[in-house]
Amino acid sequence: MTLVVYHRTTIADARRAVEKGFQDADWDFGLRDAQTGEDVLVTGVWLSDRPLSENDGVSGDAQLEVSLDVEVADLASYELEGMMWNARVWVVSASLIKERGKVRIHGVDPGTSWFHKAWSEDD
């Protein structure tokens, strides 16, 4: 089964992800260790079950679509449950996406539509 998930980012990072693959990054989602109260960093690539926008608090001009050859249950240990009330969010390793996924640009901000034309001409 193919699971389709999304990642919003800058145009430059989107193009790099399509051409060379994602790179793991450290994310601080405001998570705290329940025992120590210290900040918790999550390492990987965040993905969501629907395209997120700036209205959701996610910045970036490009929306990537990631098709993963996995079942949703395979991502259970990567899910950040309750992170968003209206979307599911996972942080998976870049290597999992490289091994079992395909990445494409799903869309760009209309204010940067020149990029969409240039990208389409490259195809």
Image: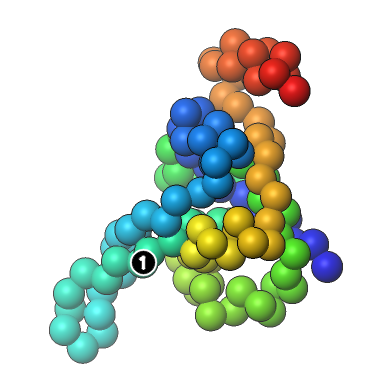
Camera-nearest residue between 31 and 70: 70
Camera-nearest residue between 79 and 56: 79
76 relative to 62, above or below: below
Quarter holding the N terminus is: bottom right
Q: Which residue is mark 1?
A: 42
Q: What residue is drawn where x is 70% and y is 50%?
A: 102
Residue 106 drawn at (x, y percent): 68, 36
Q: What residue is drawn where x is 58% and y is 65%?
A: 96
Extreme residue in the bottom direction = 35
Q: Is residue 100 left or right of residue 1?
A: left
Q: Residues within 10 Å of mark 1 (few under 14, many from 20)?
A: some
Image quadrant in which you'd find residue 116: top right
Q: Is residue 8 left or right of residue 25?
A: right
Extreme residue in the right direction = 1
Q: What residue is drawn where x is 53% and y is 72%?
A: 79
Residue 50 drawn at (x, y percent): 65, 52
Residue 95 drawn at (x, y percent): 54, 62
Residue 82 drawn at (x, y percent): 49, 71
Q: Is residue 34 left or right of residue 120?
A: left
7 relative to 110, above or below: below
- What colouring method underlies this structural image? rainbow
Kind of residue indicated by mark 1: Val
